[in-house]
Structure formats: C-alpha cells, structure tokens
Image: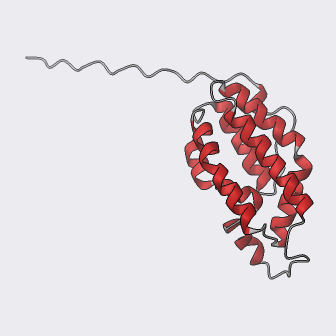
C-alpha cells in the first residue's frame, strides 16, 4: 500500500483517539469509567507526539534515518501507546484544547512525511505506527526500518514506435 493512501486514511489526531476513533469505542455501549483523561496521561501522549514529530521533521533529507527514528520513538513510547489505546477503548476523549493542539501539528507532520512517501522503510514504519495505534502489536525488534531501503527501478521512457511506410 502506498504511503500516501495510508496517510490519507490515517488522521494524525486519531493517535489520541479523537473523532472517529472514539466513535468505534462508544459503540460498545460500555460506560466510560472516567469521562476524561488525566493530565499526566495527556502529558505522556503529548511527549510521544512531539517525539514522533521530531523524528519525522528532522529527517526529511534522510528517509532511512526517518524510518529508523520512527521505530525508535515507537519502542521508547510503547507504554504510552498502550495507555492511549486503553483510553480509546474506554471511550475517553481528550479535552478540546488538547485536540486543537494536536490538529495544529498535523500539517507539519504530513508535509514532512510526504517527502519520504516512496521510501519502503518509511512505509513500513508508518504501517508499524498504524498497527500500534490501532491497538495491535507493532512488529518486533527486527523492524523493516532497520534494513537498507530497496531501490525503486528507474522508469525508462518508452521507445517511439516507428511506422513502416
């Protein structure tokens, strides 16, 4: 799957369970134990998002490094990702101010990651991110992001067809 299609379907703010991600959790008809997310958890989520944003935006000229850094952020923030998923599953929603802050970061993130959209390692890292944020397990330590990028063969222009007279 091309990264542009993955990113189109993956709203950055859904990392924190805003919008549609909460709609699914609310359909379970389970009452939320707590209606809000604790400030401490919001700070952890914000630190995760900031680390992810830094990993992506600071490596736009080195896509393989970007992929490796995304993997490192996922590894370092595994407990926070689990906590975010638990909040989403329970139907808890962050405060509007927090959602607005996350939405404001989205254009910078998307612009930076689109520079490496064709890099197979970045694609694998984004897939890993999406799997982790949807409540699944991220692939283990032998992440594709640690492997060198596959070179995409260059397309050669088609030879013009000569008409026979």
Asked whether, in this view, residue 90 is left or right of residue 66, the answer is: right
Q: Give the residue furthest to the front.
A: 97
Q: Residue at x 18, y 17 (%)?
A: 162
- The percent position of residue 71, horizontal first and vertical second, equals 80, 36
- The percent position of residue 106, horizontal first and vertical second, equals 63, 50
Which colour scheme appears in the figure?
secondary structure
Q: Residue at x 57, y 41 (%)?
A: 111
Instruction: Give 108 or 123, whichever is nearer the viewer.
Output: 108
Q: Residue at x 78, y 66 (%)?
A: 94
Q: In which quarter of the image is residue 109?
A: top right
Q: Give the residue furthest to the left.
A: 165
Instruction: Give 128 or 22, whichever is nearer the viewer.
Output: 22
- The percent position of residue 89, horizontal first and vertical second, equals 83, 68
Q: Is residue 157 above or below residue 103?
A: above
Instruction: Give 57 or 73, whichever is nearer the viewer.
Output: 57
Please state, as top left, top right, bottom left or bottom right, where the N terminus lies in the image. Answer: top right
Q: In which quarter of the image is residue 63?
A: top right
- The percent position of residue 126, horizontal first and vertical second, equals 70, 42
Instruction: Give 100 or 30, whichever is nearer the viewer.
Output: 100
Q: In this view, does 99 lie above or below 113?
A: below
Q: Can residue 1 be seen in this view?
A: no
Please state, as top left, top right, bottom left or bottom right, where the C terminus lies in the image. Answer: top left
Q: Can residue 156 be seen in this view?
A: yes
Tally of marks: 0
Q: Residue at x 90, y 76 (%)?
A: 34
């Amino acid at each position: 799957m091309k990264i542009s299609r993955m990113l189109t379907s993956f709203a950055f703010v859904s990392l924190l369970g805003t919008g549609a991600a909460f709609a699914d959790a609310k359909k379970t008809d389970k009452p939320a134990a707590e209606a809000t997310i604790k400030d401490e958890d919001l700070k952890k989520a914000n630190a995760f998002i900031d680390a992810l944003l830094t990993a992506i935006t600071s490596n736009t000229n080195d896509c393989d490094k970007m992929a490796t850094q995304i993997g490192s952020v996922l590894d370092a923030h595994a407990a926070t990702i689990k906590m975010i998923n638990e909040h989403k599953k329970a139907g808890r929603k962050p405060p509007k101010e927090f959602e607005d802050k996350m939405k404001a970061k989205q254009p910078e993130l998307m612009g930076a990651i689109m520079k490496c959209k064709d890099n197979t390692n970045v694609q694998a890292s984004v897939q890993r991110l999406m799997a982790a944020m949807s409540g699944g397990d991220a692939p283990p330590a032998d992440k594709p992001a640690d492997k060198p990028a596959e070179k995409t063969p260059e397309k050669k222009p088609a030879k013009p067809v000569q008409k026979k007279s």
